[in-house]
Amino acid sequence: MVDKVPKSDLIIILGDVYAKLGKEPAYQKITGKHTLHEETYRNGELVCDFAAANNMIVMSTQFQHKQIHKGTWRSPDHNIINQIDHVLVNQNKKEVIEDIRSLRGPNIDSDHYLLKTTLKQKLPNIYKKKPNPITKWNKTNMQDPSKLRQYRTSLHNKLENIPDMNNIKEE
């Protein structure tokens, strides 16, 4: 799917990828240094390989937050918190993401926490077509009898072409 998207478009992939990303130097360009885990597990390696192959970066591990705002999943026994939900974005468009953190407060009836992503998007400029300038009447022309006659004739012809609203029948 990623190959079908034009390179100029912003690609954001987010969700539960069940991948623990560590702080190893080999993956640090892709994952950043603010991950919850010390070691990258197998699914994390696959996510990093996918990101590297598609010129993407894992943004959910790029921002420094308290540990409680990094965890995205809680185990059923409520003792283990992992960061397994991630947001990937194009490497050249990473400045669009301003912040990512998990929200522990909202009850969404899940073992996952909500992941709040703040985007900065510039709206495109809409260029409006400039209206035709309004030409002002030259009042001195109204004092010239020939020009006044020409104006009255022109105005009379335009008014004759307007349909009479009283003669239009309703269908």
Image: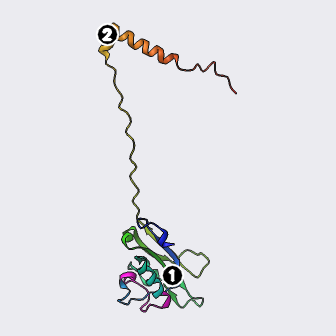
**Residue placed most toward the observer, 118 or 42:** 42
Q: Position of residue 64 (x, y in %)?
A: 38, 79
For the stretch drawn in magenta, the main secondary structure is loop
Q: Position of residue 5 (x, y in %)?
A: 47, 68
Q: Amino acid at mark 1?
A: Thr
Q: Quadrant of residue 10?
A: bottom left
Q: Residue furthest right?
A: 171
Q: Can you identify the residue that label 1 sits on?
A: 72
Q: Helix or strand or loop: what does disc 1 sit on?
A: loop
Disc sitting over residue 5 in the figure: none
Q: Amino acid at mark 2?
A: Gln
**Residue placed most toward the observer, 104 or 125:** 125
Disc sitting over residue 143 in the figure: 2
Stretch in magenta = 29-43
Q: Quadrant of the C terminus?
A: top right
Q: Residue furthest top?
A: 145
User: Is-magenta flag for residue 83?
Assistant: no
User: Is-magenta flag for residue 40?
Assistant: yes
Q: Residues within 10 Å of mark 2 (few under 14, many from 20)?
A: few
Q: Residue furthest left?
A: 140
29, above or below 151, in the image: below
Q: Helix or strand or loop: what does disc 2 sit on?
A: helix
